Structures are given as C-alpha cells and as structure tokens.
Image: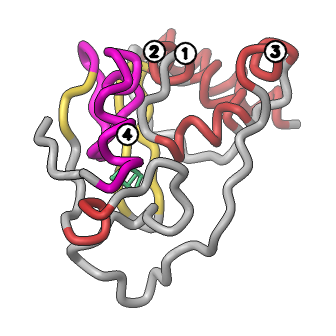
C-alpha cells in the first residue's frame, strides 16, 4: 500500500509540476521522494539542504545519528550506528538559551548550554543549527579539540 501511494505522489508531482510537503520518519522514503529536507528536533529545525547532500554529508550530530540508523550496508560500513545517550529535553518549556540537543550530543560544550545555536550556512546550500558542525571538525579538528577541552568560545 505504501508503494502505491508513493508512486501516486511521484506521478502527481511529475504530471502536474506540483510541490508538496512530505513529513515522515521513514528516512529511506524521504531520501527517495524529496528534493530538499528539513530535519527537526524538539520542535526546532536543526538542519536543512538538498536531500542527497544532507544524507551524504550530515552536519548536525542529530542528523548524523539519524542517517547512521538507516539500515543499509553502505551506512554501516561508513560509520556504524551512532548511539545517542542521555534524555531528550522536555518539549514543554525548553530553555530558550540552550541547544535542545544538549545533554545527548557527543560534541556538547559549555557554549551549547548558554547559547542557542541557529541555522547557519555550513556547506553550499546546506544549513545547520550547531556551533560545531561536521564541516568544522573535518577542517582540521581544531574546533572539536578546543571545545572538547572546554574552551568553547570559538566563533564560526
Ligand atoms: S550546538 Fe552543541 S550541543 Fe547543540 S548540536 Fe551542536 S555541538 Fe551539540
């Protein structure tokens, strides 16, 4: 049944040139169906960009964990399943100054607790709400080493 509905949506999009908003937790389907993706965590958009790019080069640690959980040989061979520890922040009254992923994030630093991260360009056409996106760590690891040591005042 799912395949029938997805085919219908794909046909409508092609025949009528229409756009639609597709909301799902089925990441393989999102990747197949969507040109652009928005990733949300506790009511906040934490990453957005072209679908292929976000799936290939996720920048926010939460997106990385989601992508790593997709059951494909490819993903597991690349980095394995990133397990998230900690508890999700309460969605009832989250601290407006703290990153909502703080407490579960393997890259968390002091700055993340006192300064909310906002969507910022990290790669061409891709934005992430993270003080320490993946692109920063692959530029030489200085940012990650700094914040892991507790010196987290670096500005992006
Ligand atoms: S801002 Fe800090 S806590 Fe939030 S996702 Fe980025 S590194 Fe993790």
Return the residue at label 1. Answer: 56
Could you classify mark 3 by the number of other residues whose Cα lies within 10 Å: few (under 14), some (14-19), or many (20 or more)?
few
In the picture, the disc for residue 53 is 2
Q: Write the residue at 32% across / 56% down.
A: 150
Point out the tag, 2 or 4, that comes first from the N-terminus: 4
Q: CA distance from mark 4 to mark 3?
A: 24 Å
Quadrant position of residue 7: top right
Image quadrant holding the C terminus, namely top left
Q: Which residues are magenta?
A: 123-150
- Outermost residue on the left side: it is 155
Q: Earlier in the sequence, mark 2 or mark 3?
A: 2
* Residue 47's disc number: 4
Q: CA distance from mark 3 to mark 1?
A: 13 Å
Pick whichever of labels 1 and 4 is earlier in the sequence. Answer: 4
- Choose between 17 and 104: the one closer to the eye: 104
Q: Nearer the viewer, residue 36 or 109?
A: 109
> Magenta segment: does it hold 90?
no
């Amino acid at each position: 049944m799912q395949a029938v509905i997805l085919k219908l949506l794909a046909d409508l999009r092609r025949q009528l040139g229409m756009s639609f908003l597709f909301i799902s937790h089925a990441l393989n389907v999102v990747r197949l169906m969507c040109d652009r993706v928005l990733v949300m965590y506790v009511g906040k958009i934490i990453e957005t960009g072209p679908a292929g790019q976000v799936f290939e080069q996720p920048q926010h640690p939460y997106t990385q964990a989601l992508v790593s959980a997709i059951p494909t040989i490819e993903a597991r061979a690349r980095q394995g399943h990133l397990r998230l520890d900690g508890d999700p922040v309460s969605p009832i009254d989250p601290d407006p100054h703290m990153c909502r992923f703080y407490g579960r994030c393997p890259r968390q630093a002091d700055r993340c607790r006192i300064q909310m991260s906002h969507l910022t360009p990290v790669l061409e056409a891709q934005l992430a709400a993270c003080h320490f996106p993946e692109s920063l760590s692959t530029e030489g690891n200085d940012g990650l080493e700094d914040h892991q040591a507790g010196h987290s005042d670096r500005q992006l």
